[in-house]
């Protein structure tokens, strides 16, 4: 969806928005997202994860349950972590929210920070203002998705449809934990 008449604002755009992004998108997550939410909230991943049939045969997770992708659960047609109370809309997991939530609606395009053409935000963001924060974050996000895709490929090679999702989740959480001490990009 393209905003045909965007207006720039000095205010933080989310203030004038009813969290459209948290209602409209399915939030797919990677191993680091699952790790941060699970540890941060001290809950099992199964309490906040939903399984979706994978569209990409190469990158879907091959488990007993089928060929699947992982996303956040939905509640009342919105992300399960969105709190709506009257006119107040709030993410209840701000400190641990998935990388894709932190970076939306920014992306890197030809080495430059840009906003997605089809963003749901009611106004344009001031890209210059967010560059310092977003560019390192998008680098970390890219690293974490590559890390996850490599894990999925490794899992699929070894365990093609033989083990349940619970074992895949244990596998990725252990790998994230053991990667913490090694060198990787940080924000
Ligand atoms: S759609 Fe854009 S402005 Fe609205 S809550 Fe999401 S990021 Fe903020
Ligand atoms: S985790 Fe937070 S920011 Fe992300 S979709 Fe859910 S409520 Fe929105």
Image (tube, helix red, strand yellow):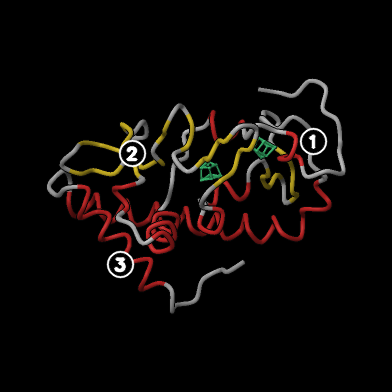
- The residue at the point 63 percent across, 48 percent down is 103
The quadrant of the image that shows the C terminus is bottom right
Estimate the spatial distance between the alpha carbons at disc 1 and disc 3, rounded to whole Å: 40 Å
| Label 1 to label 2: alpha-carbon separation | 31 Å
Residue 184: assigned label: none
The residue that label 3 is drawn on is 174
> Where does the image place residue 38, in percent across and percent down from the top left?
37, 58
Residue 128 pos. (x, y %): 83, 51
Q: Which residue is mark 2?
A: 50
At a point 32% along the width and 62% down the height, the residue shown is 173
Is 94 left, or right, of 107 in this rendering?
Answer: left
Q: x, y (%) of residue 49?
A: 34, 44
- Horizontally, residue 161 falls left or right of residue 91, namely left
User: In the rendered view, would you say 124 is above or below 151?
Assistant: above
Task: Tell me which residue sits at (46%, 27%) in the image.
Answer: 77
Residue at horizontal 45%, vertical 55%?
Answer: 33
User: Residue reaching furthest front?
Assistant: 86
Q: Is residue 79 above or below residue 141?
A: above
Disc 2, disc 3: CB below 8 Å?
A: no
Q: Tell me, for residue 124, which label it has, or none.
A: 1
- Residue 46 visible somewhere in the drawing: yes
Ligand 2 within 8 Å, label 3 CB: no
Question: 10 or 61, which lies in front?
Answer: 10
Q: Is mark 1 within 8 Å of ligand 1?
A: no
1 relative to 125 in the view: left or right: left
* Residue situated in front as seen by the camera: 66 or 72: 72
* Element type at mark 1: loop
Say what secondary structure mark 2 lies in. strand
Compared with residue 119, is residue 46 higher up or lower down, i.e. above or below? below
How packed is label 1: few (under 14 Cα within 10 Å), some, or many (20 or more)?
Answer: some
């Amino acid at each position: 969806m393209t905003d045909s008449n965007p207006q720039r604002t000095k205010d933080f755009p989310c203030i004038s928005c009813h969290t459209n992004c948290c209602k409209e998108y399915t939030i797919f997550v990677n191993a680091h997202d699952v790790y941060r939410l699970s540890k941060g909230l001290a809950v099992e991943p199964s309490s906040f994860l939903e399984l979706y049939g994978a569209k990409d045969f190469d990158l879907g997770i091959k488990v007993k349950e089928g060929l699947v992708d992982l996303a956040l659960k939905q509640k009342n047609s919105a992300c399960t972590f969105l709190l709506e109370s009257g006119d107040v809309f709030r993410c209840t997991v701000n400190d641990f929210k998935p990388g894709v939530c932190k970076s939306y609606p920014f992306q890197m395009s030809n080495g430059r920070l840009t906003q997605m053409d089809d963003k749901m935000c009611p106004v344009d963001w001031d890209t210059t203002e967010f560059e310092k924060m977003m560019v390192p974050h998008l680098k970390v996000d890219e690293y974490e998705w590559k890390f996850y895709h490599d894990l999925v490929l490794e899992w699929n090679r070894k365990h093609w449809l033989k083990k349940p999702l619970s074992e895949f989740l244990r596998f990725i959480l252990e790998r994230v934990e053991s990667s913490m001490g090694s060198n990787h990009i940080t924000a």
